[in-house]
Image (tube, grey):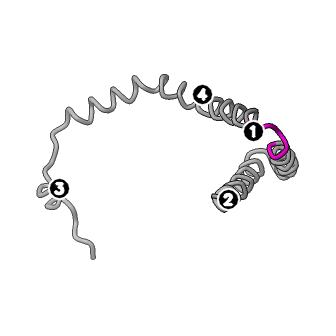
Amino acid sequence: MAMFAVSTSITQAYYGNRAADFLLGEKAAMMYRWFYCLVVFGGAVTALQLVWTLADVANALVALPNLLTLIVLSGYVVDKTKDYFSRPQLTLEERAEQEEPVT
């Protein structure tokens, strides 16, 4: 379990650094690295209950934009789903007949 925790921490540090560099530039990536080190140290010396509470809040903040997007796009998805299922569906045999052979 400890190896999983360490590898996850390293992976998150790397992906966050790459994202900061891509979106905001090298200066932001350097600030992210410092911030990440401070957060990891803070998590190691803070009470466990507070760390879990902060993790729960962070997960909720990450989920919020996704949930809002699902609500906004739900009508579009319903329309596209109805359109797809209103078309005649081909059987596997019919689909295989229409495909061109790979040469």
Q: Earlier in the sequence, mark 4 or mark 3?
A: 4
**Eye-nearest disc, 4 or 2:** 2
**Magenta residues (range):** 43-48
Q: Residue at 39% across / 23% down in the picture?
A: 75
Report how far apart the C-alphas of labels 1 and 2 lie in the structure: 16 Å
Mark 2 packing: few (<14 Cα in 10 Å), some, or many (20+)? few
Which element carries disc 4, helix, strand or loop? helix
The numbered dot on residue 3 is none
The residue singled out by tag 1 in the image is: 48
The residue singled out by tag 3 in the image is: 95
Q: Earlier in the sequence, mark 4 or mark 2?
A: 2
Report how far apart the C-alphas of labels 4 and 3 lie in the structure: 41 Å
Which element carries disc 3, helix, strand or loop? helix
Mark 4 packing: few (<14 Cα in 10 Å), some, or many (20+)? few
The residue singled out by tag 4 in the image is: 64
For badge 4, the amino acid type reads: Leu
Which element carries disc 2, helix, strand or loop? helix
